[in-house]
Amino acid sequence: MGSAGNITGWITLFFGLYGLAAGVGEYRNPGFWSNMLGEIRASSALQFVTGIVTLALGATIYLVNPFDPADWLSILVTVIGGWIIIEGMLILALGDWFMNFASRLMGKEARFWAVLAIIFSLAAIFAGLVRLQI
């Protein structure tokens, strides 16, 4: 269970678990992310829902994480929360443009992005477990 003293560790751990699952899903089924972006790009309703959910998740991470300027992980989690807020706002304001940009960014390098997500996710899981002393 989370408490004020270990919330940064829990956020980091769950962020890593999410990224690991998403990375493995894309690696196992290349094109999954691209198809998902295509479906979101094709639907204004999905763009709106994606933007709202992204904005809400980013705001939750940003507001719940106890910011400590002496703690690098706390700073990183706060910055990630802030970036997720910006991403949600971009999806709401410029959904078609943002989804096109994301699709071009991923391109045909789906496996590369999946491996990169898995590596960063394993690092986040490790950092979260170390912080939680599990």
Image (cartoon, helix red, strand yellow):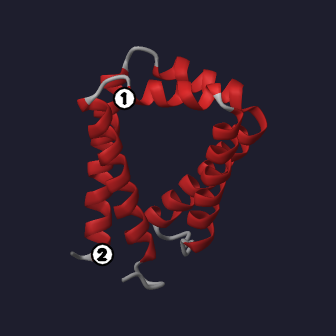
Quadrant where the C terminus sits is bottom left
**Which residue is the site of mark 1?**
113
Indicate which label's residue lies in the foreground, 1 or 2. 1
The amino acid type, in three-letter code, at marker 2 is: Leu
Crowd rating for badge 2 (residues with CA inside 10 Å; few <14, some 14–19, many 20+):
some
Q: Residue shown at 49%/66% (left/top)?
A: 74
Residue 12 image point, x, y percent: 39, 62
Instruction: Left or right? Give the position of 56 relative to 111.
Output: right
Q: In this view of the protein, which residue sits in the foreground, 51 or 130?
A: 51
- The residue positioned farthest toward the right in the image shown: 93
* Relative side of 49 to 114, left or right: right
Q: Is residue 92 left or right of residue 58?
A: right
Residue with the mark numbered 2: 132
Q: Which mark is residue 128?
A: none
Residue shown at the point (38%, 70%) measured from the top left:
9
Q: Categorize mark 1 by other alpha carbons within 10 Å: few (<14), some (14-19), many (20+).
A: some
Distance from Cα at disc 1 to Cα at disc 2: 28 Å
First-in-chain label (1 vs 2): 1
- Would you say the residues marked 1 and 2 are in contact, meaning their CB atoms lie under 8 Å apart? no
Residue at image location 40% in from the left, 79% down from the top: 6
**Residue 52: x and y, percent?**
68, 52
Q: Quadrant of residue 29?
A: top left
Residue at coordinates 56% horizontally, 64% vertically from top-left? 61
Vertical position of residue 41 compared to residue 64: above or below: above
Q: Secondary structure at mark 1?
A: helix
Picture coordinates of residue 76, whole percent (x, y): 49, 57
Q: Secondary structure at mark 2?
A: helix
Residue 67 in the image: above or below residue 51 = below
Identify residue type, mark 1: Trp
Q: Position of residue 32 (x, y in %)?
A: 38, 29
Q: Quadrant of the N terminus?
A: bottom left
